Image: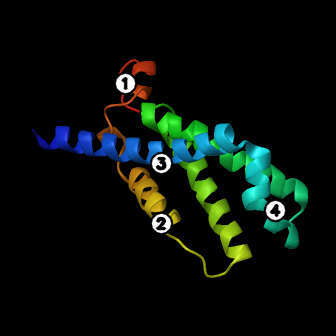
Amino acid sequence: MNDKTTRAAALLFTRGLLGIIFFMQGYGKVFTYTAPKVYNMFFKDFEKTFLPKWLIYSTAYYTSYVELICGFLLIIGLFRKYALYLLAIDLFVVSFGHGLIEPIWDLQHVIPRAILLITLLLVPQQWDVWHTDSLIAGNKKL
């Protein structure tokens, strides 16, 4: 394998892995638990904070659906940059929320996702050659 193929395979794996992690998280929230149950399980404690209930409730929906949809988009390689930006916001929201409830909290779920996401944001997009975006753009470099 040449360097370009190895690099493309590594990026496909990284993007696919991050996509699967977020997709499965979102799938569980949307289809297994549903957003109202997710709110009761994970977001109810935020009612004790200064945040308004409407914001907390909409955040439960935002994180659930962004993780599901953007995870899927990363897996197939469609709208990659937009998906990464929305997932970065998701990680900010989740990190802020956990820190608001408990200042010292377990980072084991956030840090690996953040590292993979930052890696994908920093790597030049032209290195990620195996994606659906190229089919839509007519194989033009994105």
> Please, what is the three-letter code of the amino acid marked with disc 4?
Lys
Q: Mark 4 points at which residue?
A: 44
- How far, Cα to Cα, is label 4 from label 1? 47 Å
Q: Between disc 2 and disc 1, whose residue precedes?
A: 2
- How far, Cα to Cα, is label 3 from label 2? 13 Å
Q: Between disc 4 and disc 1, whose residue precedes?
A: 4
Q: Between disc 3 and disc 4, whose residue precedes?
A: 3
Question: Residue shown at 40%/20% (left/top)?
Answer: 135
**Circle 4 residues within 10 Å: few <14, some 14–19, many ≥20:** some
Badge 3 vs badge 4, beta-carbon distance below 8 Å? no
Question: Residue shown at 42%/26% (left/top)?
Answer: 132
Q: What x and y, as percent, mark residue 75?
A: 44, 36
> Please, what is the three-letter code of the amino acid marked with disc 3?
Ile
Q: Mark 3 points at which residue?
A: 21
Q: Name the residue under label 1.
A: 140
Badge 4 vs badge 2, beta-carbon distance below 8 Å? no
